Image (spheres, helix red, strand yellow):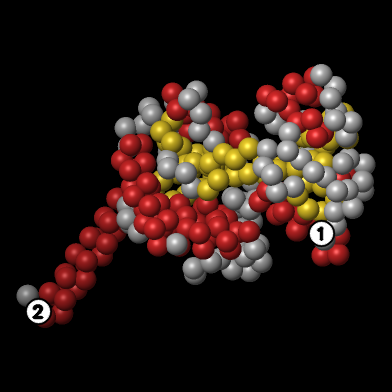
Amino acid sequence: MTKLTLYLKHIFILLILSSSVAVGAETIRIATGEWAPYVSKDYRHNGAIGHVIEKIYQAEGIGVKFGYFPWTRGYKMSSDGGVDATMPYYCSAEREKLFYCSDPIVSGQLVYFHRKDFPFKWRSIDDLKGLNVGGTLGYFYGEEFEKAERDNLFKVQRIVSDETNFVVLMKGRTHVFPQDKEVGYAMIRRLFPEEERQLITHNPNPIHTQSLHLIFPRNNEESKRRLDIFNRGLKVLKDSGELQGYLNAMSEGVYIEGGAYGE
């Protein structure tokens, strides 16, 4: 056998081995939906939470593929085994009957947005008495809010979208609008020019704070292993401060404005 033949045989074997690795590489399919700035198909790395997930699994040689669906459809696809996980979700006792919940990735704060020329002070539901409050159709703002709405403590103007609620708030037709703080400011940056953005603020007292998670269906035999990998990697990012760096970049709009933290 000539040296050239041996060389070509060696190259052929290497190609076969590399192809086998590529074919056998694991990829996790994750269902999600548009909820900027936490996650968006228009953001670099699918937003900060997408970046965190990519970083953790790629360090273990595992690929990640995000699919965008209506929330109810993505949730059902995950519970039925059509995808491997879904995010970002709050965890509840009811939800944990079907899913394993990861350790918390970030805590989301629900706050009241208002115009700066309306000096809104909020500490309890009674502070909403007599106000025109914005709300989005189909959203649940907590039992206390819903009961006060039914009791006519305040008037809730429920309309079709969060974006329209911010437009109505900007025009002064409502006094306050409850929304996740990060999601709200991402919408404000997208909807209004710089001079108008300065007209809106939020009350610093949160309505509630809940953590967001990556969740894995219990009926998938790979879920527990994938959960453990994610939680280990998440702890590394937290301990190093890298996770906070991603979240700071998210708050500053870096993922939509031409780059991603840590690239």
**Is residue 210 depicted above or below 98 in this figure?**
below
The amino acid sitting under disc 2 is Thr
Task: Report which residue position mark 1 lands on.
Answer: 197
Residue placed farthest to the left in the image?
Answer: 1
Element on which disc 2 rests = loop
Is any part of residue 91 visible from this angle? yes
Q: In this view of the protein, which residue sits in the foreground, 72 or 175?
A: 175
Q: Residue at x 81, y 19 (%)?
A: 151
Residue 68 in view of the camera:
no
Splitting the image into 4 quarters, where does residue 241 fall?
bottom left
The percent coordinates of residue 178 (x first, y second) are 74, 39
Residue 94 place in picture, x, y as percent: 50, 23
Residue displayed at 43% across by 30% down: 99
Residue extending furthest bottom? Answer: 3
For numbered disc 1, what is the local secondary structure? helix
Q: Name the residue located 62 percent from the left edge and 65 percent from the top edge.
A: 254
The answer to which of marks 2 and 1 sits earlier in the sequence is: 2
Kind of residue sitting beneath label 1 = Arg
Q: Evaluate if marks 2 and 1 touch, with contact meaning CB atoms under 8 Å apart.
A: no
Number of numbered tags placed on the structure image: 2
- Image coords of residue 250 (percent x, y): 60, 59
Q: Residue at x 49, y 47 (%)?
A: 105
- Residue sticking out furthest to the top: 151
Residue 77 got which mark? Answer: none
Q: Which residue is mark 2?
A: 2
- Displayed quadrant of residue 20: bottom left
**Crowding at mark 1 (Cα within 10 Å: few <14, some 14-19, many 20+):** some
Snapshot quadrant of residue 73: top right
